[in-house]
Every structure is written in structure tokens, then in C-alpha cells.
């Protein structure tokens, strides 16, 4: 379980880096608005962990998993943020092939490519690195910090909704 939490944190952080780099290239600013206060995007954490486990379990069917998992995570995240908090951090509604503005064909292709990079390049490196650092107490502190960030953010956002 500890390894999954560590992978989740790392993929969440890498997703934050990826999105901010993409924002820098497309919009010109590095920092993109984020739901949480810390430098993490949990949807990438969930996606990365699910993709890694899917590949370990059945590499033959990974292509279909690399389509379904990222799209499901992205759609559920977008729908939840929009429905619950009226937040729309991305909007694909102007894309030709899209669903609710939450997912689209163009980025689905990107997620398939990124999924291959994750399981074939990043995950093996991550496994080696976590074998060296996995028992360090910093991992527990980082995960507690993430949980505290979630609790504070949700409390503040729910309080704002109640007004």
C-alpha cells in the first residue's frame, strides 16, 4: 500500500508539472489554476497508478486500458469539479469530437501516447527509485501533507458553496 501512495504522489506531481509546462507553451504562464493548494493533480495520480497496475496485470490488453483509464479519469474529474464546485479547468466543447467538454478525441490520442511513456519508461525508473527510497519517513509526511491539503481545500470550497 505504501508503494501505491508513493506512486500516486509522484504521478500527481508529474501531472502538475506536465499541465503547467503545457500552460507555459500554450498560454505563456507556468502556473495554471489548481484545485488543491499544493503542486499536485490527483487525477494524474489515479491515472498513473491505474495504468501501471493495468499493465502489470495484463500487458496484452494495455492498449485498450490506455484509452479507457485516462478518459474515464479525465471525464469523472471534469464532471465532478463542474457539477460540485462549478469549476471548469479545461473545456473541450469547441473540439469536433468531444463529450460534455470534459474529454475529446485530440487529447485522447495524447493520453494513449502518454500512457505508453508512463508504463514503458517512467514506471520502471520509478520502481527502481522507490526501491531505494521507499522506506524513508519523508513519504509518510508527504502523503499526510497531501491529505491535509485535500481536507483544507474541500472544507474551504464547501464553506464557500454554503454562502
Image (cartoon, helix red, strand yellow):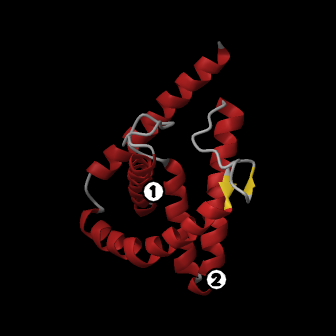
Answer yes or no: is residue 52 visible: no
The structure residue drawn at horizontal position 50% and vertical position 63%, both measured from the top left corner, is 48
- Residue 143 sits above or below residue 114 on the image: above
Residue 146 % position (x, y): 42, 41
Mark number for residue 47?
A: none
Q: CA distance from mark 1 to mark 2?
A: 22 Å
Label 1 packing within 10 angstroms: few (<14), some (14-19), many (20+): many
- Please report whichever mark, 1 or 2, sits nearer to the chain's N-terminal start: 1
The structure residue drawn at horizontal position 40% and vertical position 63%, both measured from the top left corner, is 3
Residue 32 % position (x, y): 44, 40
- Residue 86 sits above or below residue 117 on the image: above
Mark number for residue 61?
A: 2
Q: If the image is split into quadrants, where does the C terminus sit?
A: top right
Answer yes or no: is residue 40 visible: yes
Q: Nearer the viewer, mark 1 or mark 2?
A: 2
Q: Are marks 1 and 2 in contact (CB under 8 Å)?
A: no
Front-most of residues 132 and 162: 162
The structure residue drawn at horizontal position 45% and vertical position 61%, both measured from the top left corner, is 4
Mark number for residue 8?
A: 1
Image-based side of 11 in relation to 161, left or right: left
Residue 130 % position (x, y): 31, 66
- Residue at the extreme bottom: 60
- Residue 114 sits above or below residue 24 on the image: below
Q: SS of the residue at dot 2? A: helix
Q: SS of the residue at dot 1? A: helix
- Residue at the extreme top: 163
Image-based side of 162 in relation to 152, left or right: right
Amino acid at each position: 500500500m505504501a508503494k501505491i501512495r508513493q506512486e500516486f504522489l509522484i504521478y500527481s506531481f508529474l501531472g502538475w508539472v506536465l499541465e503547467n509546462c503545457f500552460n507555459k507553451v500554450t498560454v505563456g504562464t507556468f502556473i495554471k489554476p489548481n484545485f488543491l493548494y499544493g503542486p499536485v493533480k490527483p487525477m494524474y495520480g489515479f491515472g498513473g497508478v491505474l495504468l501501471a497496475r493495468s499493465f502489470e496485470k495484463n500487458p496484452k490488453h494495455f492498449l485498450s486500458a490506455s484509452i479507457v483509464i485516462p478518459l474515464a479519469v479525465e471525464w469523472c474529474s471534469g464532471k465532478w469539479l463542474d457539477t460540485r464546485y462549478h469549476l471548469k479547468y479545461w473545456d473541450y466543447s469547441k473540439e469536433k469530437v468531444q463529450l460534455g467538454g470534459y474529454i475529446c478525441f485530440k487529447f485522447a490520442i495524447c493520453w494513449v501516447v502518454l500512457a505508453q511513456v508512463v508504463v514503458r519508461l517512467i514506471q520502471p525508473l520509478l520502481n527502481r527509485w522507490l526501491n531505494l527510497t521507499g522506506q524513508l519517513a519523508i513519504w509518510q509526511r508527504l502523503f499526510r501533507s497531501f491529505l491535509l491539503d485535500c481536507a483544507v481545500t474541500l472544507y474551504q470550497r464547501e464553506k464557500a458553496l454554503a454562502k
